[in-house]
Amino acid sequence: MGSILNSTTYRVVFILGMTVFLLHLLFTFGGSRWSGFHGTSSPPNCTVLVAPSGVAMAEKAVATPLVTSKISPPTTTPGKRANAVFVILARNHELFGLGRSLQQLEQRFNHQFNYPYVFLNDEPFDDDFKRVAAAVVSGNVSFGLIPKEHWSYPSWIDLNKAAAGRKKLKNIIYGPSESYRHMCRFNSGFFFHHPLLAQYEYYWRVEPDVDFTCNIDYDPFVYMQERSLKYGFTISLHEIPQTVATLWKTTKDFMAQHPEYVSHPNTLEWVVDKRTGDYNLCHFWSNFEIANLNLLRSERYQAYFDHLDQAGGFFYERWGDAPVHSLAAAMFLRKDEIHFFEDIGYRHSVFENCPTGLTFNLQNCNCNSKRSVNLQTHTCTGDFLKLSPQSDFNITTMKQHNVVQ
Ligand SMILES: Nc1nc2c(ncn2[C@@H]2O[C@H](COP(=O)(O)OP(=O)(O)O)[C@@H](O)[C@H]2O)c(=O)[nH]1
Ligand SMILES: [Mg+2]
């Protein structure tokens, strides 16, 4: 009996101790993310640093944190609409986490605007998924199956080399995962070719388990359209170096082979380490994207994707769609075609953008501005905003920086 009492007491003390410890961890690191409806325990986006090595790298990187302005929320012409759609890649089992994202997106924005949704999956969506997704949102919904050739190994990939690549990255987030690589390749090169998206000009990418933490009372699609913007982001970070070991070399080869595809002015200065000429690992975090589909459908983007795909780095390394989209934006867009949606409160895992100043109050935000990643040193957003609108990292400048051999 005594021993039972002792072991029970031990268990109670142990459980209490663990509870206190976990609560401490949550309050120290989790912030408001954990107080949400159903915080995700999945690790943050592939396309950004998360692993200890990545964090260490980020600390080393000399990035300029954003000094936020006291902006007020943007406005757009009332009643004006864009030819736009939400795009959501998801698996059937992510329905609950996705429902939560969609509820917030609707409450914060889309209940006033009723933009449609396209859901994509590499397997057929089941009836539960379709029923719940359709019930949560205000706009029309379509469900699409991804063609096999957009989610499988191309013929030229050496499967043994791919397996060796996964093994090499086994200690990095998603490093051993095959499906993750198919997902990153699909988001890099194929989603915009899906027939369900053919009729649209702008897309907004949404994922399961993200939070929209402020009201959006204007139309970001129309905002993009009225200003001829091509790409919009909320968060930028540094990539884990091992996942993109040869991405920059492959991109430089592409620029050398196709100088006619590189725009002038461009935004390459944002992605180049001026001391070494290497990729500085900066990328827009692509789990949130509002962009013009024609950028991705363009001949030059297609040529860039094909060039990368032939090189095999989606499988031999773990190239993410975020650095791929970002390098494309850097080559093909002027600074004034890329927009930082400073006013959109958005959280994915441990990283978030939270507005400051007037916007915070007017948009009824449920986030902590001080935790905004764009205020911290592992962001690239401050450096992006500092770029001159005429920034043009041309071939001559690139040679000086050994960007093109
Ligand atoms: N259909 C499908 N979607 C996937 C798969 N893997 C990831 N996704 C989706 O791709 C997006 C990114 O995946 P996620 O797990 O959130 O990666 P992270 O954001 O980098 O941590 C999310 O919208 C996922 O639902 C997959 O194997 N099949
Ligand atoms: Mg995610």
Image (cartoon, rainbow, N blue to C red):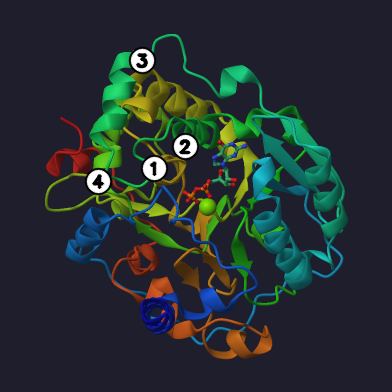
For badge 2, the amino acid type reads Tyr
Q: Residue furthest front?
A: 1
For badge 1, the amino acid type reads Tyr
Query: Does any atom of ligand 1 lie closer than 8 Å to the CB of label 2?
Result: yes
Which residue is located at x 83 percent, y 59 percent? 136
Which residue is located at x 58 percent, y 17 percent? 149
Name the front one of labels 2 and 4.
2
Q: Of marks 2 and 4, which one's residue comes earlier in the chain?
A: 2
Q: Which mark is residue 174?
A: 1
Q: Which mark is residue 159?
A: 3
Q: Which mark is residue 241?
A: 4
Q: Quadrant of the N terminus?
A: bottom left
Question: x and y percent of residue 172 in the render?
Answer: 30, 45
Q: Quadrant of residue 247?
A: top left
Judged left or right of residue 377, residue 174 is right
Q: Residue furthest top?
A: 155
Question: x and y percent of residue 370 in the render?
Answer: 43, 84
Name the front one of labels 4 and 3.
3
Q: CA distance from mark 4 to mark 3?
A: 23 Å
Q: Is residue 147 depicted above or below 213 in this figure? A: above
Element under label 2?
helix
Judged left or right of residue 390, residue 147 is right
Which residue is located at x 59 percent, y 54 percent? 229
Q: Quadrant of residue 194?
A: top right
Q: Which mark is residue 180?
A: 2
Q: Residues within 10 Å of mark 4 (few under 14, many from 20)?
A: some
Query: Does any atom of ligand 1 lie closer than 8 Å to the CB of label 3?
Result: no
Q: CA distance from mark 1 to mark 4?
A: 14 Å
Q: CA distance from mark 2 to mark 4?
A: 17 Å
For badge 4, the amino acid type reads Pro
- Say whether marks 1 and 4 touch (CB < 8 Å): no
Q: Of marks 1 and 2, which one's residue comes earlier in the chain?
A: 1
